[in-house]
Amino acid sequence: MAPTATKTANRSNHPNETKGKIITCKAAVAYGPGEPLVVEEIIVHPPRKMEVRIKILYTSICHTDLSGWQGESEPQRAFPRIFGHEASGIVESVGEGVSDMKERDYVVVIFNGECGECVYCTCEKTNMCEKFGVNPMKKEMCDGTSRFSTKDGKAIFHFMNTSTFTEYTVVDSACVVKINPQYTSSLKNLTLLSCGVSTERI
């Protein structure tokens, strides 16, 4: 299925106003296999060590999102959940230890992250990172917790290292690629780099 890019709502949150704070924003949340997505306000917690919080500007949908939402693989089911794994946006804030990007950088998220050091990242034949490679069973951040929650405090699971059907998301810094400012006019099209291009070497 060809991805379709959609621009998220324009919110007034300014990076300097929200850094280190909880953000309340809208997201499309799935509460069960095949159930209609619920667009509602959620809580997005600040990024922790080696994580990045991103304001999503454009996001796409592909068949992998549909398969996950429909719960085609029972062992991979985890709800409530925020789907989406193709997006471009702007860095709102970074966690401790992140040095290769900063606030206001334009970025593309990638579900198949790269640590740059493992045997797979240093191999020319694959980009399936040992630590951040796509894992369909993964539903939380590396520390075993979620950065999303409902307004009443219930955790919302992550999807494919990314979760982009939300106005703000938190991802590992290894799952973010900084975009040259000269290409920011093409951010809508750059969502294709998140999946269609990055999977060519797997």
Image (cartoon, helix red, strand yellow):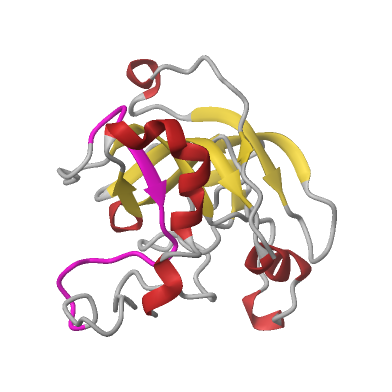
Would residue 47 be seen by someone viewing this image from the given angle?
A: no
Q: What quarter of the picture does the C terminus occupy?
A: bottom left
In the rendered structure, which segment of residues is drawn in magenta? 102-119
Q: Residue drawn at (29%, 52%), measured in percent from left and top? A: 173
Closest to the observer, 39 or 87:
87
Q: Residue lying at the far right in this picture: please name it.
A: 35
In the rendered image, the vertical position of residue 111 relative to residue 170, given as above or below = below
Q: Is residue 70 left or right of residue 104?
A: right
Please state the horizontal and vertical placement of residue 134, each as a whole percent of the image: 44, 72
Closest to the observer, 50 or 114:
114
Please state the horizontal and vertical placement of residue 116, each as a whole percent of the image: 18, 67
Would residue 103 be seen by someone viewing this image from the given angle?
A: yes
Please state the horizontal and vertical placement of residue 191, each as a whole percent of the image: 50, 49
In the rendered image, the vertical position of residue 108 relative to residue 174, given as above or below = above
Q: Residue drawn at (30%, 32%), measured in percent from left and top? A: 182
Indicate whether residue 165 is drawn in magenta: no
Q: Quadrant of residue 186?
A: top left
Q: Is residue 97 left or right of residue 3?
A: left
Q: Residue drawn at (19%, 82%), measured in percent from left and top? A: 123
Q: Quadrant of residue 178?
A: top left
In the rendered image, the vertical position of residue 167 relative to residue 194, given as above or below = above
Q: What quarter of the picture does the N terminus occupy?
A: bottom right
Q: Is residue 33 left or right of residue 169?
A: right
